[in-house]
Amino acid sequence: MGEFLSFLGSNLSDFWVNTGFANASWGNLAMLIIGCFFIYLAIKKEFEPMLLIPIGFGMLIGNMPFNLDAGLEIGIYEEGSVLNTLYQGVTSGWYPPLIFLGIGAMTDFSALISNPKLMLVGAAAQFGIFGAYMIALLIGFEPNQAAAIGIIGGADGPTAIFLSSKLAPNLLGAIAVSAYSYMALIPVLQPPIMRLLTTKKERVIRMKPPRVVSHTEKVIFPIIGLILTTLFVPSGLPLLGMLFFGNLLKESGVTRRLATTASGPLIDTITILLGVTVGASTQASQFLTWNSVFIFTLGAFSFIIATASGVLFVKIFNLFLNKNNKINPLIGNAGVSAVPNSARISQMVGREYDPTNYLLMHAMGPNVAGVIGSAVAAGILLGFLL
């Protein structure tokens, strides 16, 4: 009987050692709370649910405590585990180009083609990237790390992941979560900046309706766009190539099945895998550091600079335009590449001051230009630093 009780006690002890309760730390608890908060924001507040639910649940998966010495091969950083295999799409950088393929297949560049000067607004918003880059350098980050942090200002999660996987893989989790967090908080962060930097008179500026863009122009645009951008920035080819390829699938009119697959099942699948694995990568030991705090702070500065740069650029640009061609500065915020959310914010704030003024189509011009701009900026930084 004594031997049986000893055997049973030994088994129970071994069982307890391998439970999550025995291996839990305050860091695990903190990250589980953060994951639940992300899910709350997605469901209750409807902040980017397609992103925050996979990332939030991924945080729960990645931060469930277990015995690292048990050889279970279930952690995202354990070689040979299922999660580690899925995470290679992030670390190797092939999830982001597939996301860009889907974005291209969903995007209508008509607003930009009909009014090419809106490309400058999208370009101006990229100052946020380089502004945050310089600030990160000043506070002590290495150039590679500073560049990966700065890209958060483009409000483009896939580009942030692509660049950080190349330049600062050790900061990838914090950068990705920061980028997607600020994308989700666009409705909260951008309107106060837009109101602060514009006058009531500027907010009610009416822009000319965009001209009708021909099918030929739509087909030529992705071809010319690819050639011009990648001749200047070859290192941006993985993102820009897939973006313009996806758009050609959409606009050609003869590859509807491929365009539907790219913009539907494919991008949805990659978004799920990307969100869950990025969330799971934020294990407490890797994520709860002072670097993460600095990254979130710099990400906020980057995003604020990007939004302000777009609005201020339009105000300055208007000084050189005649009265009939003025641009409403409220669309300057759309230069960040969060398509179409930032364009919707332009429309929302504009209608607060003139319910009959529809800015959405105009805002889509700098919005899609911002997608191209953030990919170009990433390519420039890769070319300098890799």
Image (cartoon, rainbow, N blue to C red):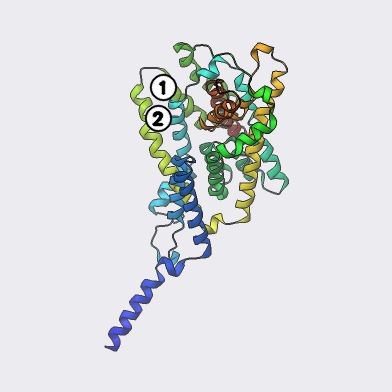
Q: Is residue 88 visible?
A: no
- Looking at the picture, tell me which residue is in the foreground, 306 or 101: 306
Tell me which numbered mark, 1 or 2, is placed earlier along the sequence.
1
Quadrant in which residue 164 is drawn: top right
At x 47%, y 53%, the residue is 36
Tag 1 near tag 2, CB within 8 Å: yes
Give the residue at mark 2.
263
- Looking at the picture, tell me which residue is in the foreground, 202 or 288: 202
Under circle 1, the secondary element is helix
At x 60%, y 39%, the residue is 189
- Looking at the picture, tell me which residue is in the foreground, 343 or 371: 343
From the viewer's perspective, tell me whether residue 221 is left or right of residue 141. left
Q: Position of residue 19 (x, y in %)?
A: 40, 67
Under circle 2, the secondary element is helix
Give the residue at mark 1.
250
Q: CA separation, marks 1 and 2?
A: 9 Å
Q: Residues within 10 Å of mark 2 (few under 14, many from 20)?
A: many
Mark 1 is on which residue type? Lys
